[in-house]
Image (cartoon, coloured by chain):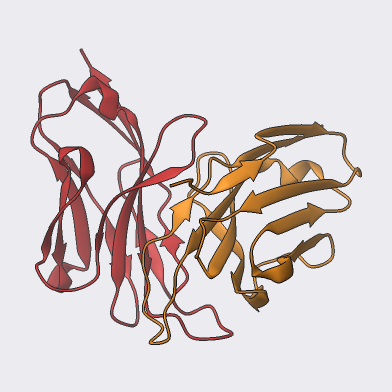
Chain colours: A red, B orange
Amino acid sequence: AQSVTQPDIHITVSEGASLELRCNYSYGATPYLFWYVQSPGQGLQLLLKYFSGDTLVQGIKGFEAEFKRSQSSFNLRKPSVHWSDAAEYFCAVGGVFNYGGSQGNLIFGKGTKLSVKP
Amino acid sequence: EAGVVQSPRYKIIEKKQPVAFWCNPISGHNTLYWYRQNLGQGPELLIRYENEEAVDDSQLPKDRFSAERLKGVDSTLKIQPAELGDSAVYLCASSFVNRERSRTEAFFGQGTRLTVV
């Protein structure tokens, strides 16, 4: 079954510390992988995406993620966290769409809430 | 460039009442999605449109939910009658899917927070 697992429900880090949010997926085809961020009361903003090519992808706000096919993982990292990074982070997997079916639809993890200590 | 626009932002209704949500996708995006996000969960797809056709509505509870995307642009999601368990955030998103069926990322609106009392 296709799924996304974010094992950490809530993470607290100190401002300036490094961050890694974990994401593991199960997908039967070539995965397209995404990280979204959601601030309270807001929609989802795309941080970065992986479609193909270089397995280390750079995103906005200083985030990066590394696709590891052997581990079915797509962990999100940031070297130095800012207080404004406090939000909820969602990993999602999709693929090539078929027509008239559910293949390719984005499947989201349950999210990891990030708190930042001063 | 305007993003995905949803209205209303918030809605409180009594159970058994109808409710409707509206979405205007990014110009040129042929694919539109409605997601439901329950508290503490990730979004779950309800329906996906390509142009004006609902190509995947397998997760839409069809006894009370309906959706339409007239002219392949704006879309409306309706619940009638609403139940307490429908309280959630309803997110609309859009993207472009080309002839080769590859994709770009989905852009999300701010969502409509529905509370059923």
Location of residue A80 with respect to B74 vertically, above or below:
above
Q: Is residue B27 left or right of residue A27?
A: right
Query: Which residue is rendered at x = 43% and y = 86% of the image?
Result: B99
Location of residue A14 with respect to B69 vertically, above or below:
above
Rendering coords of residue B65 (x, y %):
79, 60
Rendering coords of residue B75 (x, y %):
69, 59
Find the residue positioned furthest to the top.
Answer: A118
The residue closer to the viewer here, B50 or B116, is B50
Location of residue B72 with respect to A41 vertically, above or below:
below
The residue closer to the viewer here, A93 or B102, is B102
Find the residue positioned furthest to the right.
Answer: B16
How many numbered marks are there?
A: 0
Q: Is residue A104 left or right of residue B84?
A: left
The answer to which quarter of the image holds residue B84 is top right
Query: Which residue is rendered at x = 53% and y = 78% of the image?
Result: A102
Rendering coords of residue B32 (x, y %):
57, 64
Rendering coords of residue B94 (x, y %):
51, 60
Location of residue A95 with respect to A63 vertically, above or below:
below
Q: Quadrant of the C terminus of chain B?
A: top right
Q: Is residue B9 left or right of residue A17?
A: right
Query: Which residue is rendered at x = 79% and y = 54% of the image?
Result: B78
